[in-house]
Image (tube, rainbow, N blue to C red):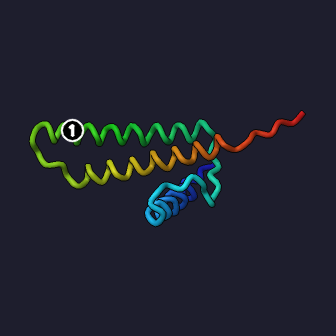
Amino acid sequence: KDCAGIVERQFQQWKRERETLGVPPLYSTLPINFSDRQLFQRRRFYRKRLWTAQQKEIALQRSGKPVSKKITNAILNNSDWVEFYDCAIKEQVSKPVLEVA
């Protein structure tokens, strides 16, 4: 079951709370029903996108060309997503695992 819409809403809420509080919240009010593997995969996906945008920015700066607003926005957006998934992973890892005998 794909809950991309729930994740998008959760991300927007997390972003608003971060802007009002000034620090990223480490809790979530909406549950993200992803396994650990899915969370790590999505974080890796956005890290790769962030890295690509950062490399484009570095290449433009080296060549003396202006960095476009599109690349700057991509860096900001992808770094937000990476931070969001970092918080989601920390939250999921901190939950205790109950063992049934």
Instruction: Tell me residue 29's x, y (percent).
Output: 63, 60
Instruction: Tell me residue 47's x, y (percent).
Output: 41, 39
**Residue at x-position 51% and y-position 44%:** 86
**Amino acid type for the residue under numbered disc 1:** Ile
- Label 1 neighbour load within 10 Å: few <14, some 14-19, many 20+: few
Instruction: Tell me residue 54's x, y (percent).
Output: 28, 40
**Residue at x-position 23% and y-position 40%:** 56
Residue placed farthest to the left in the image? 64
Rendered-image quadrant of the C terminus: top right
Residue placed farthest to the top in the image? 101
Q: Is residue 34 left or right of residue 86?
A: right
Looking at the image, how many numbered discs can be counted on the residues? 1
**Residue at x-position 16% and y-position 41%:** 60
Residue placed farthest to the front in the image? 22
Instruction: Tell me residue 81's x, y (percent).
Output: 45, 49
Q: Is residue 53 left or right of residue 61?
A: right
Q: Secondary structure at mark 1?
A: helix
**Residue at x-position 29% and y-position 42%:** 53
Residue labelled with disc 1: 58
> Of 38 and 58, which appears nearest the observer?
58
Residue 85 vertical position relative to residue 15 in the rendered view, above or below: above
